[in-house]
Every structure is written in structure tokens, then in C-alpha cells.
Amino acid sequence: MAEQTELGRFLRARRAGLRPAAAGLPMATGTRRTPGLRREELATLAGVSIDYYTRLERGKEARPSLAVVDSLARALLLNEEERDYLRALAAEAARARPGQKRTPRQPSRTVRQTTRLLLENLRPCPAYLLSRTSYMLAANPGGWRLLPGIEDWPAAQRNSIRYTFLHPAARDLWVDWEQKARACAAQLRAVAGEHPDAPDLAALVGELIVKSPEFSRLWARYEVGKAGFGEKTFRHPAVGTMQLNHEVLELVGTDGQRIVVYMATPGTPDHDAMALLDMDQPTPSGTTT
């Protein structure tokens, strides 16, 4: 049997997680061996032969057409981000050659001076700069204090997703930690679709799989989702509970760097709590410049 590809693993995981009723199939009598779709059911829904689909899932076929990929995406009820991820996996599988190795470069961690100025001007809103794999490259005072204890880690370990799964303060910080953790794993999946051979991604995922059973479980679900705007509730040990909105600002001309900024309506208790985080404090040692 050919070695299973990431494309095959994704198809298998999403097929296993899709209930027949959700896919519009009638309730079957008797006991099913799997709660998800069978291969033949997904193949029928996607309009491909069971043999062809089986070859895709087992890694024996690695060049599906875009039409087939989109048919599979519809059958699996993938959202737009998940469909783009499936397309990226199919394109990567088609490019792969036996024995061929690529040497992707590490993304730059250089922080532009104008970016530092922007972080400063966003005060009192907590804001920080992340790399494509969520390493914290810079922050204003409130940004550092928003994740209590992250500044105590060495600069090379200051990663917001690593913090979510490995820092002892994280589970108490987010009121809905499970939702936060699920979003983090999905976000890394999105990065994997765009940069499948990225060394920074491989190192982070490898560490989290070894050290966090929760991450390993979520990673195996193959959910995909990019970071975006929204609302988060923090149970912060220094300023109490606060509900903050956030936006993600992607920086052009960088290797996927983005600014995450949190905010609240002026005059509200949430804004007052947020402003307390802006109290001046020393910049953490070892910050990348």
C-alpha cells in the first residue's frame, strides 16, 4: 500500500466526522461500524467511483482534478476555508515527487520600526505582533500583560498557541478554553495548507503533539480556520473578568506577520479593566528586533 498522504489523512478524518444524517443520507437500520460516512457513501455523494476515492484516501492517487476536489468539498460539507485547505493539499500532492526534497526558508522575525510605532499608538488597547505560526514578536504593555506569564518564557518560546495549550494560567484565562483551543488547532491547520513544509510549523506542531494530549486530539480532527475578528471573555488574574472585541490586521511585505488588537467601548467596566493592563512595565528581555 502506498504511504498515506496528508490529502488522504484529511479526507479520512473529515469523512469519519460527518454524520450520515448531516449529509442528507437516510437513517440506516442495524449497527454501523463507523459513526461517519463510509467510503462508498462519500464517493456516491461526490460523484466519483469508490475505487478512485479509495485510491485518493490511501495515497495511491495524488492528482485529482479541481472539479473532483470541489465535489469532495461539497460532499464533506466543507466551509470556504476548509475547501481552500483541501485544494492546497491536492496541489501539494500533485507537485510531490518521490525522493524530491525542498528546503523552505524560515520566516523573518524582523519587526519593522513602523510596526512598533503602531503598537505604541494603539494604547491603551492591548495589541501584539504575531508571526505566521503565532510567535509573539512584539507587543505594547497591555499586549504582554494580556497573557499573564508569557513574558517569563524565553523569547523563542513566546507563542500564543503554545501558551494556550502549555501554560498553566491559560485554562483559567479564557472562560471557554475548549473553544479557544479548538480555534488554535484549526488556525495551525490553515497555515499547514499554505506552508506544508514550513520548519517553524513542524517544530511547533511536533512539540504540542508530544506535550499536549488535547492538542493531539484536536489536530487529528483536521478542522481548518483562519484567525479573524470576534469577541473573547478573559478571566484575568490582575484586572478581573472583561469582555473584549478583537481584530486581526495582516501586514503586507512580511512573512505572514499580523497584529492582534483588543478593544472595548470607552466608559464601560471592560474598557476600564483593559486600560489597567496598559500600566507601564519593562519590555520582556530577549524580544526579537
Image (cartoon, helix red, strand yellow):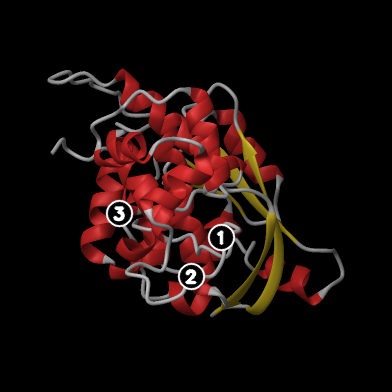
* Position of residue 55 in the picture relative to residue 138 (left or right): left
Residue 89, compared with residue 285, is above or below; it is: above
- Quarter of the picture holding the N terminus: top left
Q: Which residue shows up at 15% across the image and 20% down it?
A: 98
- Residue at disc 3, secondary structure: loop
Q: Secondary structure at mark 2?
A: loop
Q: Nearer the viewer, residue 264 or 224?
A: 224
Q: Nearer the viewer, residue 152 or 180?
A: 180
- Mark 3 packing: few (<14 Cα in 10 Å), some, or many (20+)? few
**In the drawing, what numbered circle is on residue 163?**
none
Give the residue number, with chain letter if any, for mark 3.
154
The label nearer to you, 1 versus 3, is 1
Give the amino acid at mark 1.
Answer: Leu
According to the picture, the residue beneath numbered tag 1 turns out to be 25
Residue drawn 34% across and 38% down?
7
On-image quarter of the C terminus: top left
Q: CA distance from mark 1 to mark 3?
A: 52 Å
Q: Earlier in the sequence, mark 3 or mark 2?
A: 2
The answer to whether marks 3 and 2 mark residues whose Cβ atoms lie closer than 8 Å is: no
Q: Which mark is residue 28?
A: 2
Q: Position of residue 132 (x, y in %)?
A: 45, 38
Q: Residues within 10 Å of mark 1 (few under 14, many from 20)?
A: few
User: Residue 74, image x and y in percent?
Assistant: 58, 42
Query: SS at mark 1?
Result: loop
